[in-house]
Image (cartoon, rainbow, N blue to C red):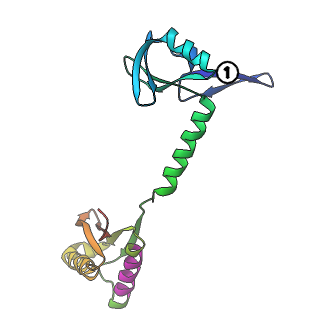
Amino acid sequence: MAIRRKRSFGKSRRVIREHRLNAEITEPKVRLIEGEGARILKIEDALEEAKTAGVDLVEIAKGQAVPIVRIIDYGRFKFEKAKKDKESKKNQKVMQVKEVKMGPKIDVGDFDRKCSMAESFLNEGDNVKVTMRFRGREMAHTGLGLEKMKSFAEKLTGIGLMEKNPRLEGRLMTMVLRPKGKK
């Protein structure tokens, strides 16, 4: 990355750019991309073409023996790249994992309420992590907890699939459900 210093009120400040421009490109040869085609030129020739066009020579791809460059206006290039990044962020949905906690001695009413909570999370498109905590002597009855977890998953078979089977880790038994349409 190229570093350019700017002066402001007597203090120096670093400005870091993502791409190298014009004289900052030090390799002897570059691959110049123009429309559909590309050609390999000496750096001096590429700089001369950029100068005659009145725009910048911008390095697009780094880390190669022959860097890939384009002759474009750098300000406009940055603007279009920011616009594309913003558009791609807008279209992407962040997958969240919602958690439902319960114990092995949970009663029927509470169990149904937890199932309806998980159902609403799955309908929204989120994954659901079901956690069961064993306390004290409850550790001797982990089989009952496993049965509760399986019945929880069976109750939600219409809208959710089990991504991770119930697994005991220390005093916690966890399982993950995902919406049926997601992969």
Q: Residue at x 41, y 79 (%)?
A: 117
Q: Residue 4 lies in what quarter of the image?
A: top right
Q: Residue at x 44, y 9 (%)?
A: 28
Q: Residue at x 29, y 74 (%)?
A: 160
Dominant SS in magenta:
helix
Task: Tell me, yes or no, whether the highlighted magenta stretch contains residue 148.
Answer: no
The x, y position of residue 56, in whole percent, is: 59, 22
Say whether residue 10 is left or right of residue 128: right
Task: Tell me, yes or no, whether the highlighted magenta stretch contains residue 117.
Answer: yes
Say whether residue 126 is left or right of residue 21: left
**Where, quadrant-wise, is the C terminus in this rendering?**
bottom left
Q: Residue furthest left?
A: 143
The x, y position of residue 109, in whole percent, is: 37, 90
The residue tagged 1 is 5
Task: Give 165 or 142, whichever is nearer the viewer.
Answer: 165
Task: Give 167 or 121, whichever is nearer the viewer.
Answer: 121
Give the magenta range: 110-121
The x, y position of residue 130, in whole percent, is: 33, 71
Task: Give 139 or 110, whichever is nearer the viewer.
Answer: 110
